[in-house]
Amino acid sequence: MFRTDLAAARQSPALARRIVATPVTEISPGKVLQAMQEMADEVGVQVVPAAMHAAMNLSMDCDGGQPGASISLLAAAVARAQWTNTKIVEPDTLFSVPRSEWPEP
């Protein structure tokens, strides 16, 4: 949708003068894991590394992909763990998060 709109905007000289492309490099999976680890260090529950990897794998199906979707999914699992007084977030915790609580596409 966005690319189509951008292509149409380039056809209009008035809009083309106002649009500036900003290159954004994709964040590496290692940096995503580092961000997840930093988030995990700030919360009151233990997040096992396998849960972080599971969040990355599950988020591949979401629009927007990584890193936002994987971090949001892990955050939802952490919130669920805190709500239920669970002290550890494992891959099973991620799978228990209802699809309705996953990141929006």
Image (tube, rainbow, N blue to C red):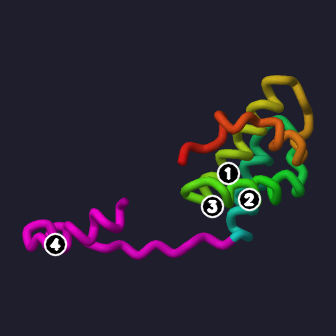
**Marks 1 and 2, Cα distance to the nearest angstrom?**
8 Å
Which residue range is magenta in the image? 1-28
Q: If you read the primary sequence from the N terminus, does the residue marked by circle 3 or circle 4 appear first? A: 4
Would you call the spot at circle 2 few (<14 residues within 10 Å), some (14-19), or many (20 or more)? many
Q: From mark 3 to mark 1, how far is it between C-alphas?
A: 8 Å
**Observer-nearest of 97 and 81:** 97
Q: Position of residue 91 (x, y in %)?
A: 88, 48
Residue type of the residue flagged with mark 1: Ile
Of tags 3 and 1, the one toward the viewer is 3
Q: Secondary structure at mark 1?
A: helix
Pick whichever of labels 3 and 1 is earlier in the sequence: 3
The relative height of residue 24 versus residue 42 in the rendered view (above or below) is below
Task: Indicate the position of residue 27 as horizontal and vertical percent values.
Answer: 60, 70
Residue farthest to the top, as pictured: 84
Give the amino acid type for the residue marked by disc 4 in the picture: Ala
How much space separates mark 3 and mark 2, taking CA atoms? 7 Å
Q: Quadrant of the N terminus?
A: bottom left
First in residue order: circle 4 vs circle 1: 4
The residue where tag 1 is placed is 71
Q: Which residue is mark 2?
A: 56
Q: Residue at x 91, y 33 (%)?
A: 87
Q: Is residue 2 magenta?
A: yes
Label 2: state its secondary structure. helix
Return the residue at label 3: 66
Under mark 3, the amino acid is Gln
Q: Residue 3: within the magenta?
A: yes
Q: Are marks 3 and 2 in contact (CB under 8 Å)?
A: yes
Image quadrant of residue 42? top right
